[in-house]
Amino acid sequence: MSILGDFLEVRRVIAVRLMVRHREALLGQAAQLQGAAARMLAASHEGVSALRDADMAFARAMLQATGNVVALSVLNTMARVLEELPMVAQAMYAEPAANTASMARVLEALRDGGAGAGPSSSRRWPTWTR
């Protein structure tokens, strides 16, 4: 597996576990997550650094809502990897539309309790993020 593949696997494992365990707390932060999602969508047209920063802000908002400081520490380390290894960031954010679609699936899964996590949901935004 590549560095990017490993990176994404760790991020997904953490996200899924925390979304299941802290769904209500995350839903309680819907307005903050909506704002972070909007910033990420806007950043998708501003280059790799802007998209990276918006993506990390979105992930931090989710982790802060869960109260899991260890996961937040892991995310901060991952953010450093993206800053210090431009090849990883460039690979991760090479397709901005895929990044925002992935975030939309995360929000749908959160809203729907997992029902919106499939590939068919990747082309639309959840109603509560508009």
Image: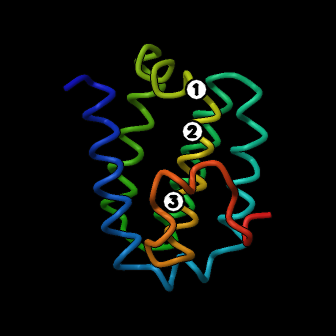
- Tell me where residue 55 appears, x and y as whole percent: 58, 43
The image shows residue 91, relative to residue 55, as above or below, that is: above
At mark 2, the secondary structure is helix
Judge left or right: residue 58 versus residue 1. right
- Tell me where residue 8 appears, x and y as whole percent: 34, 39
Could you tell which of marks 2 and 3 lies nearer the N-terminus? 2
**What is the C-alpha distance between the residues marked 2 and 3?**
11 Å
The image shows residue 53, relative to residue 87, as above or below, that is: below
Q: Do the residues labelled 1 and 2 touch (CB within 8 Å)?
A: yes
Could you tell which of marks 1 and 3 lies nearer the N-terminus? 1
Instruction: Return the residue at label 1.
Output: 95
Is the residue marked by circle 3 packed among few (<14), some (14-19), or many (20+) residues within 10 Å?
many
At mark 1, the secondary structure is loop
The residue sitting at 63% across, 76% down in the picture is 29
Instruction: Return the residue at label 3.
Output: 106
Instruction: Return the residue at label 2.
Output: 99
Task: Name the kind of residue labelled 3 in the image.
Answer: Val
